[in-house]
Image (cartoon, rainbow, N blue to C red):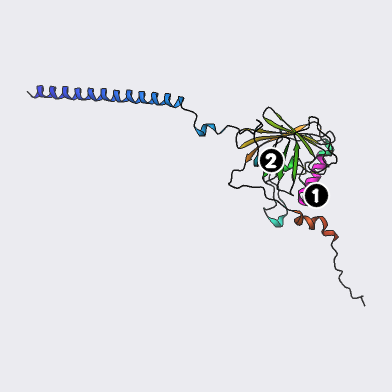
Amino acid sequence: MYCALARMVTVAMLHVLSNRDEMTKRRQRNRWRRAVWLAGFVLVLPAPTWAQDDAIARHYDGNPDINGVWQAINTAHWNLEDHNAVGGPAEYGVLTTTPPGQGVVVGGEIPYQDWAREQQRKNFENRWREDPEAKCYLPGVPRATYMPFPFQILQGTTHIMIVYGFAEANRTIHMDKENPEPAPIDSWMGRSHGRWEDGALVVEAAGFTGQAWFDRAGNFASDTLRVTERYTPNGPNTMTYEATLEDPNVFTRPWTIRMPLYRRLEENVRVLEYKCVEFSEELLYGHLRRREETPTGDDP
């Protein structure tokens, strides 16, 4: 009797387990069907907003719209080449030091002629008094682009203006000249002519004074410098900036720097004027100040 009862209980349990396994399998099949259906539904939906973030805005003339406030975030301002941290005047602690940084020179090193590399080293040794930035002179091209301050691009069809904060520098890019005109006079920011090429703004700049530096490390060129810049949008808020520099008086060959530029997205962001002249007067003209002579015992 007990054996028969045990067999009945065992059969009942196996039946329940079998039904439970079948129900589990059905649930799993239903889940797979719902997942496949949902995946197919998602595929036919329009791309969501987050998937369209790479779209590049267009100007009304069909070219990329690069209007806005932009800024480079790197250490090119201190040195275009790879560099270690370097100390400054000891009495100011860390405030005047150079942070370490990765270079932006394609290929790693600026191809100086021998005499020019030696001059660059001398510039670096005398940077506290000789760097044009310390004197609040206009930064020149391409230095104005990667100083640690934002700049604004104002895009038109025949002209594009770039406004920089430091020393109230600015430049006009002439887009309406098929044959670039020579600069009427050499200047710190030179003369710029531009065109659109494969979705990039290409700017050719020349007519420089030869007095500007490229960074605080004393990298420099002469007044025969020619700079070809490319501003290539990668998305709505980033651009790749490239500048190829040619100067047969200083370099052994043309060379290029490359870096990303980022759109400033803060609400009401603006470029503020950095009027630095008053801070450079002592450096520039302090030696001309009349000094009171100390009276001596021989004076009547």
Main secondary-structure element of the magenta-colored stretch: helix
Return the residue nearer the eye: 89 or 231.
Answer: 231
Residue 280, image quadrant: bottom right
Instruction: Indicate yes or no whether the magenta region holds residue 118.
Output: yes
Label 2, residues with CA under 10 Å away: few <14, some 14-19, many ≥20 = some
Is residue 109 shown in magenta?
no
Residue at image position (79%, 57%) is: 281
Q: Which residue of the protein is positioned furthest toward the bottom in this rendering?
A: 300
- Report the label total: 2
Please rate how many residues cluster around mark 1, counting C-alpha atoms within 10 Å: few if below 14, some from 14 to 19, many from 20.
some
Disc 1 on helix, strand or loop?
helix
Q: Amino acid at mark 2?
A: Leu
Q: CA distance from mark 2 to mark 1?
A: 32 Å
Taking the spot 52% from the left edge, 31% from the top edge, the residue there is: 51
Task: Report the residue at 60% width, 37% height from top.
Answer: 237
Front residue of this view, candidates 90 and 299: 299
Q: Which residues are magenta?
A: 117-134
Up-down relation of residue 213 to residue 59 (above or below): below
Image marks 2 and 1: residues in contact by CB distance under 8 Å:
no
Residue 80 visible in the displayed image: no
Give the percent coordinates (x, y) of residue 5: 10, 24
Q: Quadrant of residue 245?
A: top right
**In this figure, which residue is indicated by the disc labeled 2?**
154
- The quarter of the rendered structure image containing the N terminus is top left
Residue 130 image label: 1
Q: Position of residue 125 (x, y in %)?
A: 78, 48
- Relative side of 143 to 116, left or right: left
Q: Which part of the image, by quadrant, shows the C terminus?
A: bottom right
As drawn, which residue projects farthest toward the left?
Answer: 1
Disc 2 vs disc 1: which is toward the camera? Answer: 2
The amino acid marked with disc number 1 is Glu
Where residue 108 sits: x, y (%)?
A: 71, 34
